[in-house]
Image (spheres, helix red, strand yellow):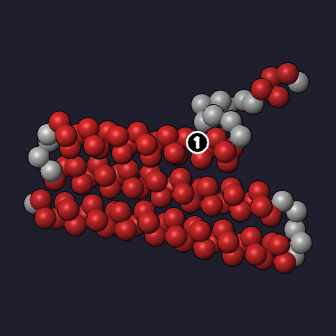
Amino acid sequence: MHYYIEIAAKIIEAIGILVILIGLLYALTTYIISYLKKAENCYGKLRKSLGKSILLGLEILIAADIVATVVTVPTLKSVSILAIIVLIRTFLSLSIQVEIEGKFPWKKISDEKLHD
């Protein structure tokens, strides 16, 4: 059973990496086409598109880490390592999402709309 869980974790990791790579290729292709057409805000769209693919890839990689931890004997060291990895990736995800949207995810209404 452990063998199959290890394989599943590796497949999930590969999917996460592929999502990031495919997202990068898509974002760059879209950017180049927009730039050649002299469209407005090409760079902003590139950042947003690339950020979304990185976010999705990070979420998938977190799932792979959790699945991989199921295989190991649950020691304080392995659980601590998983916790640190998840915290780092979650912090990265949060900061990328704030960069993309310009606000924290739990803020439904921007401050500008409250003042109108």
- Element type where label 1 sits in the image: helix
Residue 4 to residue 64: above or below: below
| Position of residue 73 measured from the top left corner of the image (x, y, whole percent) | 11, 46
Q: Is residue 34 left or right of residue 89?
A: right
Q: Please name the residue shown 22% across and 67% down the image.
A: 7
Q: Quadrant of the N terminus?
A: bottom left
Q: Residue at label 1?
A: 95
Q: Is residue 40 left or right of residue 43?
A: right
Q: Residues within 10 Å of mark 1 (few under 14, many from 20)?
A: some
| Position of residue 75 measured from the top left corner of the image (x, y, whole percent) | 14, 39
Q: Please name the residue shown 12% across and 59% down the image.
A: 2
| Position of residue 39 measured from the top left corner of the image (x, y, whole percent) | 87, 68
Residue 46 to residue 90: above or below: below
Instruction: Please name whichever residue, 112 or 35, is drawn nearer the observer in this view of the structure.
Output: 35
Q: Please name the residue shown 63% across and 34% down the image.
A: 104
Q: Quadrant of the C terminus?
A: top right
Q: Please name the residue shown 43% across and 43% down the image.
A: 88
Residue 76 to residue 7: above or below: above
Instruction: Please name whichever residue, 95 or 67, is drawn nearer the observer in this view of the structure.
Output: 95
Q: Is residue 102 left or right of residue 74?
A: right
Q: How many marks?
A: 1
Q: Is residue 60 left or right of residue 11?
A: right
| Amino acid bearing label 1 | Ser
